[in-house]
Image (cartoon, helix red, strand yellow):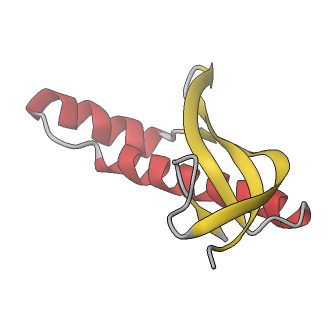
Amino acid sequence: MIVVNTETIPNMRIVESRGIVQGNTVRAKHIGRDIAAGLKNLVGGELSGYTELLTEARRQAVLRMMGQATELGANAIVNVRFSTSAVTSGAAELYAYGTAVVVEPVA
């Protein structure tokens, strides 16, 4: 599955659009990450626990989006975008979306 954040794919031609596909996940932080983040806020630096949490959430959302595209018979997703939102205190949603398409190499 080709996944890009552009409207086109170099050396490929879009022959059919299969529609919008999406994947999302809602993740909650846990007390261990909160304590570590609180301490890190005092001295500065990367909050690696949260970085790992968001990296895994992004991966899962993309995999779910790719699964939808596969079900629609697509072999690529173009115009991929990400969005996040707070669902409740301590939990956030990561949402990935794009357009599922069928592409073929340019002759």
Residue occupying the far left of the picture? 43
Residue occupying the far front of the picture? 107
Residue 88 x, y percent position in the rendering: 64, 20
Q: Residue 40 versus residue 85: which sits nearer the camera?
A: 85
Residue 74, relative to residue 4: is it above or below?
A: below
The reply, left or right, for residue 68 in relation to residue 79 is right
Locate the C terminus and report the quarter of the image it occupies.
bottom right
Residue 2 shows up from this direction: yes
Residue 14 x, y percent position in the rendering: 71, 59
Q: Residue 71 versus residue 92: which sits nearer the camera?
A: 71
Locate the N terminus and report the quarter of the image it occupies.
bottom right
The reply, left or right, for residue 80 in relation to residue 49 is right
Residue 29 x, y percent position in the rendering: 51, 39
Q: How many numbered circles are shown?
A: 0
Q: Quadrant of residue 25 in the image?
A: top right
Q: Residue 33 versus residue 64: which sits nearer the camera?
A: 64
Residue 64 shows up from this direction: no
Q: Residue 103 versus residue 63: which sits nearer the camera?
A: 103
At a point 76% along the width and 57% down the height, the residue shown is: 101
At a point 75% along the width and 69% down the height, the residue shown is: 75
Residue 30 x, y percent position in the rendering: 51, 41
At a point 90% along the width and 60% down the height, the residue shown is: 72
At a point 84% along the width and 45% down the height, the residue shown is: 19
